């Protein structure tokens, strides 16, 4: 992920400076407490809860994937023989489906809604064999959570929302946080808010949060006795130090992104297709929706020729990846169509204006 004078990366993370992180790590040294929900982890949980307009709704994890696994175990438990299936949208990052597999589920990949790019409750199959549904907030865009709450109440099927990229959405819309639907976040370096590696479960259910703590710590609860299925999903205090330092500066970071978004919007005015920008998406994503697959591929190749990196963030859907090929429902027309037309363009909070102009120029010529 390095830019030279000419090459443009699709994303260039910048985490807090080492000195800012060290100031927090000194607190861990003073307390001689580095893991198992140390003081920095508890501090970051409290500050994120407040940033989400909640008293106590956040449990930190070692990664976004670990957050999904912990939420599945706390909300649904491991797969049972009579309900072995987890429904997962094909249009997502591999972690969503892998987490369900790790909890013993047989993954069945489903299509998404054309407007929201998410698996929506109205279109979700409701068979007796379904033990879990894992809707994904694609690029940080939330599915209709009211509809998922009704689905959960009507069917009794447990639902966990993979909201990996939606940290900013939760800051802007605290009403998204619920007691019946645990949401999971990723704090990977390529996400807007980052601890390097890390994640969180966000859930306004005190009993649910207690179960997250238990499954994240080997199924232990006030003893060293394993009482339920679990894993080591805990975040270390070193990672929490990065998050605390990042949170100190986060309003300025979001403002910097907003400036880049305004430049992008001006630069592509009048070009064919459609540009999807934050805050509709998480700030790390700028997506060009091509009118058709041919122009998408043409622009992708032209960017590459001009040493501008692009990315199909969710590839062509999980259903064409070798490990998941047998898991797909027979046809996924929306996934097939959208994944061939949505192209991730370069983004970072300090993307120079000259590079945005170059990206827009190549787009205009090739489209
Ligand atoms: C980033 C991401 C994850 C994985 O998070 P990690 O922190 O890398 O484990 C899962 N799902 C989606 C949709 C993501 O974008």
Image: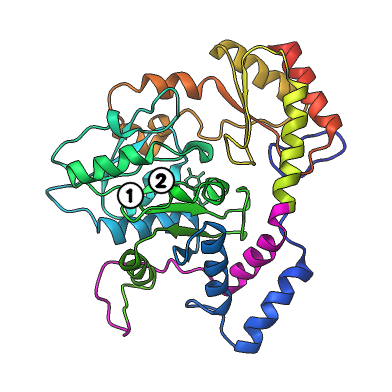
Any atom of ligand 1 within 8 Å of the CB at mark 2?
yes
Which quadrant: the C terminus? top right
Specify the quadrant of the image occupied by residue 107: top left
Asked if labels 2 and 1 touch by Cβ distance under 8 angstroms, the answer is yes
Which secondary structure lies at badge 2?
helix
Spot occupied by residue 51 in the image (x, y as percentages of width and height): 57, 59
| Disc number for residue 96 | 2
Instruction: Residue at 65% x, 21% y: name it.
Output: 300
Name the residue rendered at 47%, 40% in the picture. Answer: 93
Q: Is residue 238 above or below residue 288?
A: below
- Residue under label 1: 100
Q: Is residue 247 magenta?
A: yes
Label 2 environment density (alpha carbons within 10 Å; few <14, some 14–19, many ≥20): many
Q: Which mark is residue 328?
A: none
Say which quarter of the image contains residue 211.
bottom left
Cα distance in 3D space between marks 1 and 2: 7 Å
Q: Secondary structure at mark 1?
A: helix
The answer to whether residue 13 of the structure is visible from this angle is no
Q: Which residues are magenta?
A: 222-251
Residue 160: % across, % down: 34, 49
């Amino acid at each position: 992920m390095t830019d030279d004078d000419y090459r443009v990366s699709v994303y260039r993370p910048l985490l807090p400076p080492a000195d800012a992180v060290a100031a927090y790590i000194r607190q861990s040294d003073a307390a001689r407490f580095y893991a198992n929900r140390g003081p920095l982890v508890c501090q970051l949980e409290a500050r994120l809860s407040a940033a989400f307009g909640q008293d106590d709704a956040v449990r930190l994890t070692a990664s976004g994937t670990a957050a999904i696994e912990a939420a599945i175990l706390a909300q649904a438990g491991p797969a049972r023989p009579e309900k072995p299936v987890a429904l997962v949208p094909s249009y997502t990052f591999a972690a969503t489906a892998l987490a369900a597999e790790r909890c013993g589920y047989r993954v069945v990949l489903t299509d998404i809604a054309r407007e929201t790019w998410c698996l929506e409750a109205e279109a979700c199959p409701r068979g007796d064999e379904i033990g879990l549904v894992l809707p994904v907030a694609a690029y940080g865009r939330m599915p209709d959570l009211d509809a998922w709450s009704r689905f959960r109440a009507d069917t009794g099927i447990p639902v966990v929302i993979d909201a990996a990229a939606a940290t900013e959405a939760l800051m802007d819309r605290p009403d998204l946080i619920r007691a019946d639907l645990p949401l999971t976040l990723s704090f990977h370096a390529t996400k807007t808010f980052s601890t390097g590696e890390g994640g969180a479960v966000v859930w306004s259910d005190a009993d649910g949060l207690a179960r997250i703590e238990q499954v994240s710590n080997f199924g232990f609860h006030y003893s060293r006795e394993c009482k339920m299925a679990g894993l080591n999903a805990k975040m270390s205090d070193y990672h929490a130090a990065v998050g605390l330092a990042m949170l100190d500066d986060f309003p300025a970071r979001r403002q910097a992104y907003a400036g880049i978004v305004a430049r992008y919007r001006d630069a592509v005015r009048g070009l064919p297709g459609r540009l999807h920008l934050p805050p509709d998406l998480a700030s790390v994503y700028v997506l060009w929706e091509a009118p058709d697959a041919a122009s998408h591929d043409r622009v992708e190749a032209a960017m590459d020729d001009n040493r501008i990196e692009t990315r199909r963030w969710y590839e062509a859907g999980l259903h064409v990846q070798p490990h998941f090929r047998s898991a797909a429902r027979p046809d996924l027309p929306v996934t097939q169509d959208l994944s061939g037309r949505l192209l991730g363009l370069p983004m970072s909070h300090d993307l120079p204006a000259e590079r945005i102009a170059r990206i827009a120029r190549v787009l205009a010529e090739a489209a």
